[in-house]
Image: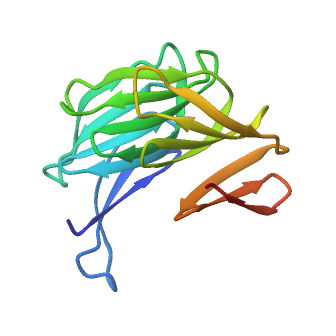
Amino acid sequence: NGFAYIATDIAGVVIIDVSDPANPLFRSNYLTSLDCKDLVASGDYVYAASSWTGLVVINVANPDDPYLETTLDLNGSAAHYIDSQNDYLYVLGNGIGDRNLYIVDITTPSNPVIYGSFPGYPKACDVSGEYAYQCDILLGFQSLDISDTTNIREVSTLKLLNPTDVMVEDNYAYVSDSGDLIKVIQLW
């Protein structure tokens, strides 16, 4: 759509006009809280992970005047990571509430609904098809079956020391750890 959305610690969600990539222009920002950790954009909405609020839904139909559509409490938890696929968000909780992977239905952006959750200490997640691949800081690398959004099942766990991020491409997961190493894991 010609816009880039940036998650920031202080300015919240920043909207940049990138229709001319050689000359990006600041358009506006929306202060979600003091600590916006991650975001995904879909259509006229930006879904932001907030350390204070949980999930924040921002209407960006008018990029010069974004406004709060709604928020979603994650059982008292902050949010620090978001992935998306189709009409679902995969939000990782962090903090004093539940530290879970939450599956959130965004069919109606003004009324997001938690469909399911999976307990743990998730640091990062990548969703591909009917599986979520999650880095859990205590357990390692997990494969989760998310085909039934209300009943997430653990398929396998590979013990890794403090995995920090994951990216899935084709048949492989690329997992980084706190020691700046990358492990390549064949999925099937």
Q: Quadrant of the N terminus?
A: bottom left
Q: Quadrant of the C terminus?
A: bottom right
> Residue at the location (46% across, 34% down)?
146
> Residue at the location (63% across, 55% down)?
187
Q: How many marks?
A: 0
- In percent of width and height, residue 45 lies at 24, 44
* Left or right, residue 138 beside residue 135: right
Name the residue at the left extreme. 62
Q: Can you say whether 23 is above or below 121 in the image?
A: below
> Residue at the location (82% across, 45% down)?
160
Q: Can you say whether 69 is above or below 81 in the image?
A: above
- In percent of width and height, residue 57 lies at 30, 35
Is 19 in front, or is 145? 145
Name the residue at the bottom extreme. 22
Q: Specify the color scheme.
A: rainbow
> Residue 20, can we see it?
yes
> Residue 12, can we see it?
no
* Left or right, residue 137 beside residue 6: right
- In percent of width and height, residue 110 lies at 19, 28
- In percent of width and height, residue 185 lies at 71, 58
Q: Can you say whether 18 is above or below 22 in the image?
A: above
Q: Can you say whether 146 is above or below 129 in the image?
A: above
